[in-house]
Amino acid sequence: MDIHIEEVNVQAEPVSEKKRNFLGAINWTAISKYIMHAVVFLLPIFFLVVAMSPLALGKALMVYSGISLSFILWLFVRLQKGEVDIPKSGLFLSVVAIIVASLVSAIFSVNPSLSFFGVGGEIGTFAFFLFMGIGMFLASSLFKGERSITLFYFTLFASAFVVFVTQSLHIFFGVTVFPESLFSSPVSNTIGSWNDFGIFFGLIGLSAISLYESFKHKFRKMFKAVLLIMVVISILAMSAVNFSTSWIIFAFYVLVYVVYQLSRMFYLQTPQGILSDIISVNFEIEKKKKIPSIALSVFLLVSVFIFAKGTMGDLTVKLGTNTQDVRPALSTTWDIAKKVLSENALLGSGPNTFLYNWLKFKPAVINDTFFWNTRFSSGSSHLSTIPITMGVLGSFAFLLFLFFLLRYVGKAAAYLGDDVTRGLIITSLLSSLYLWSFVAFYSPGFIIYALAFLTTGLFLSSLAEAGLIKNINISFFRGTKTSFVSVLVIVVMIMGAVSSFYLFAQKYRSAHYYTKALILFNVDGDVSKAEESLLKSIDIDSQDTYYRILSELNVAKIQNLFAQKDVNKETLATEFQNIFSVAIQNAEKAVEINPDEPLNWIQWGSLYEAIISLNIEGSAGVAIEKYNEALKVSPLDPSIALAKARVLSQTKDLVGAREAIQTSLNLKGDFTPALFLLAQIEVNEGNLSGAIQKVEQIVKLNPNDIGNLFQLGLLYSQNKQIADAQIVFERTVELSPSYSNARYFLGLIYDQNGEKDKAVEQFEKIKEVNAENKIVEKILENLKSGLPALDGMSESEPQPIEE
């Protein structure tokens, strides 16, 4: 193909882009740039009121849509001009390598649909890397010069200020301008996780420090005041989070900046410096420049915070913002990587599939912790997750990217040109390195990863502005064949961008209908309308989660069907069979879409478990079969073995049930549901003493669980251990004064012991919350007449009270 290529230095925005195009006086390049500015402003504050990842999905769809629209306009201008300027940078080549690696890995993924697009808000899909790469390219192409780059940062500062104000109102006054259902705790925020909140404001603080120190002799007082305000609120925000990793990385880059500024100042003031041979510099002016006092002061202050970790921890406790950082250890991540790479070293398991590797290969010791059922979507860091999800190919691409990024550090530090360009280079470099450090050593959310790509684009733009990298100019119209192929490629890219814009709009519609379905079911209790809304969601975007929830809705319809009165048996049987068949089809479809998700197999098995009591032949066997499939993809989940035990106990195979329960307890020795089922089996076999031992074991594991205490009290009562039952029920009502069932049985024990006054007191308190309960009224009447509490009542056993 006859393409004319020439290298050019880019010192300013091409004049041709300011000319009028054939649609009139519209400056499409400017509009494309403003769209990207809008993306930057909305990124920290945007979210969708949807049930599935409102922050991640909302931000992803907004960013992808914004990038698509901006890219369409950018391509339109390139089509009009007939040429493209591309920075000659290894960073772009390495990003292309990452995109290609994710594409190939997604094609051969264990779950291609999940790896290509997922639901929409996940980090690490092919779509994520593709649009982040395009976003980085657009940032380098559109944000050129001092005005554009500083506007990028001030746009980000404006958004950060909005986030800080709203979060302060939320923490200190309980006021939220956002839906309370999504922002219920003090640490709920529009950035992402609470640690991401601290990381984000670390970026704001670092950028503001660099801009202030670089332009303090150029900016007006108002702009310098804004920068100082951003530094202050950043330190306050990071203090409220008190995330040690963010403190350390932030302090490190502030120190790097201080050392850089001091070394540069001392070098310029050294008479034997060779700078005068390279560029004309007014040394007298340089000598008047002050030490970077703000940066140095911030470093010293943050150092105190790092060493005063206990004091800062007390602050977060008082604010109610103390959280726990939980993620797999690096050693655990590496152990999982070795197992995955032994199966597919080149490509890994596929982008966005770490969760299923975690469920399959997680260490058994995790079941002894509070986080035994936590579902991790990445390893100890995003970088350490890449070998697992994208294999050697993806790892090499990422290492190549980091190599080129670090390679440009030397060029940036050695730049001796004008202060404005140097300030932009250093600010964008620090921003980029700061964010990529978290990608390398942590697992941040969508916004941190997205800003890492965008600030890297800014860094490349500033390098091009300084002439430190060249631009390759590709002209399309230097031959008929060249023109045809070039135009065809751009048109195809425009069509692809338009299609992706439509795709993201559809994903939003699907998430909207899914959210609406959950509200209709959980809040309104309207199963039919919820099912209708969920079907609309599935028609737009078929996700295994949607089919699994639809199957659960089908079960709710069956429950409603059996609750109906005056329905003849034939109609009941026909309706049941129809709804049950649909429920099975939906569960089967969920498994078909994502066979590595154990919840899909569990839902399928639970359907057959539910009909065992109806004596439908083969239902128990099918349920066991599906639960076994679930164990294959999540072998360390004790709840799956317990589900098998429930099935076996219903079929009276108590030996098999005990074995399954023991399997569950071998996986997690303190698994309370397994101990309860074992206690129930003991009761059914008439072994109350054995059942009591099991429930006592459960209570020791969690002595303040009122449900466990109540069950133990009942067993004591049935086993005639009245004194023990009294102690347990007294403890239960002490922990939960409104627990009427516990008061009911405690009152009966007091009556049995002849303590009428105490018995009356318990039933009077029950009456306060159960005013219309006839049983309670009768018992009170008996007690006040000096009769036994249950005198004249037909029930031979005490009846529980509705709470």
Image: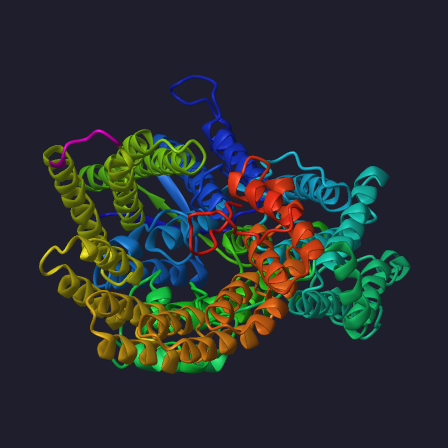
Residue 764 spot, x, y in % from top left: 66, 45
Instruction: Specify start and end residues of the magenta stretch as a single range.
Output: 565-569
Q: Is residue 665 left or right of residue 734?
A: left
Q: Nearer the viewer, residue 688 or 155?
A: 688
Residue 732 spot, x, y in % from top left: 61, 62
Residue 414 higher or lower than 223, as above or below: below
Q: Is residue 374 left or right of residue 428?
A: left
Q: Main secondary structure of the magenta part?
A: loop
Residue 639 spot, x, y in % from top left: 35, 68
Asked which quadrant contains residue 324, the reply is bottom right
Residue 546 higher or lower than 426, as above or below: above
Asked which quadrant contains residue 89, the reply is bottom left
Q: Residue at x 59, y 64 (%)?
A: 433
Residue 293 spot, x, y in % from top left: 86, 61
Q: Residue 385: in sight, yes or no?
A: yes
Q: Is residue 295 left or right of residue 415?
A: right
